[in-house]
Amino acid sequence: VTLWFWGLPQEVIEGVGSGPSHPGLLIILAFLISVFTGITFRIPHHDLVFAGIGGALSRIMLIILTAFTSNPLVYTGLAALIVSFYAEFLAVRRKDPSTYFIYPSVLPMIPGGAFYYSCIGLYTGNMQMFMVNCREWALTLVGMSIGFVFSSIIAHYARKFRSVDVTEDFRVF
């Protein structure tokens, strides 16, 4: 309510964030967020650590991949692909649904800050802030979607190929 009457702080209007930026802290926070999200989703206690590792893995992948490219579509798509492979691998090994590991692992990739700043830019009439941040969160979400779709396709065919009896298919007579 006070923001509505008194206006927004100058730091918010300019788009200056003051969140954590140390990579180690970001990885620890991603792990904790994923564990607590797993608790919220009622993931069994023996799988919570793996859900947290998935969140930390997604943050590590984002940190590494952003060093090579600044395109959110590329680095988020690759990070989503890797994290989804991790979730599919754990689902097969632990005989659990892959959603136990995918949902908590996705949270560090969600572009909440970019969405927030695009809304602030729209609210304040700063169209440059709106367009830059809107482009970032849209490309991030599309990249995540593409990564998950490719991972699902590859996992589907890997399971299908694994279940086929090779000796039956290549019999000559």
Image (cartoon, rainbow, N blue to C red):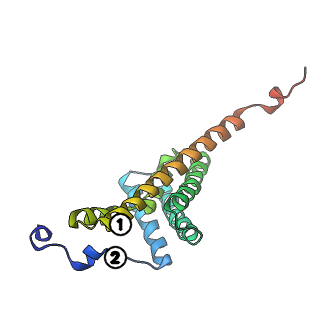
Q: Nearer the viewer, residue 32 or 111?
A: 111
Q: Nearer the viewer, residue 130 or 51?
A: 130
Distance CA(mark 2)–CA(mark 1): 9 Å
| Residue 16: quarter of image | bottom left
173 vs 51, left or right, is right
Helix, strand or loop under label 1: helix
Asked if the residue under mark 1 is in contact with the one under mark 2, i.e. CB atoms within 8 Å, the reply is yes
The residue indicated by pointer 2 is 17
Q: Nearer the viewer, residue 31 or 80?
A: 80
Q: Amino acid at mark 2?
A: Gly
Say if residue 95 shows up in the picture: no
- Mark found first going from the N terminus, 2 or 1: 2
Label 2 crowding class (10 Å Cα cut-off): few <14, some 14-19, many 20+? Answer: few
Say if residue 170 shows up in the picture: yes
Q: Is residue 164 above or below residue 146?
A: above
Q: Is residue 153 above or below residue 129?
A: above
Label 1 crowding class (10 Å Cα cut-off): few <14, some 14-19, many 20+? Answer: some
- Residue 25: horizontal and vertical position, in percent? 45, 77
Which disc, if any, is residue 113? Answer: 1
- Residue 141: horizontal and vertical position, in percent? 44, 54
